[in-house]
Amino acid sequence: MTVYLRGRVVGGDTGLWLSVPEARSLAAELARALTLGAEEMPVRRPRAGR
């Protein structure tokens, strides 16, 4: 996985370890983004300390 922010690579290649509920949530969000398009997706900011 490569992490991008505003079209620029910010994280390079990295591993991604998720629990089953996290993976299901990610899959649902990706499907939603593909259906709605990026312009309609709400922007989520990371919580402080992460």
Image: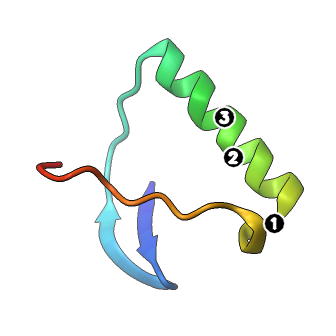
* Amino acid type, callout 2: Leu
Does label 3 or label 1 sit earlier along the sequence? Answer: 3
Viewer-side residue, 10 vs 41? 41
Identity of the amino acid at label 3? Ala
Task: Name which quarter of the figure residue 28 lies in.
Answer: top right
User: Mark 1 sits on what residue?
Assistant: 37
Tell me the quarter of the picture where residue 5 sits.
bottom left
Q: Residue furthest top?
A: 20
Q: Amino acid at mark 1?
A: Gly
Mark earlier in primary sequence (1, 2)? 2
CA gap between label 2 and label 3 equals: 5 Å
The label on residue 27 is: 3
What residue is shown at x 29% (from left), y 67% (from top)? 11
Residue 30: image tag? 2
Query: Can you give x and y, in whole percent of width and height, for residue 33 in the image?
Result: 75, 55
Q: Secondary structure at mark 1?
A: loop
- How far apart are the alpha carbons under marks 1 and 2? 10 Å
Q: Taking 19 as reference, is 42 left or right?
A: right
Q: Residues within 10 Å of mark 3 (few under 14, many from 20)?
A: few
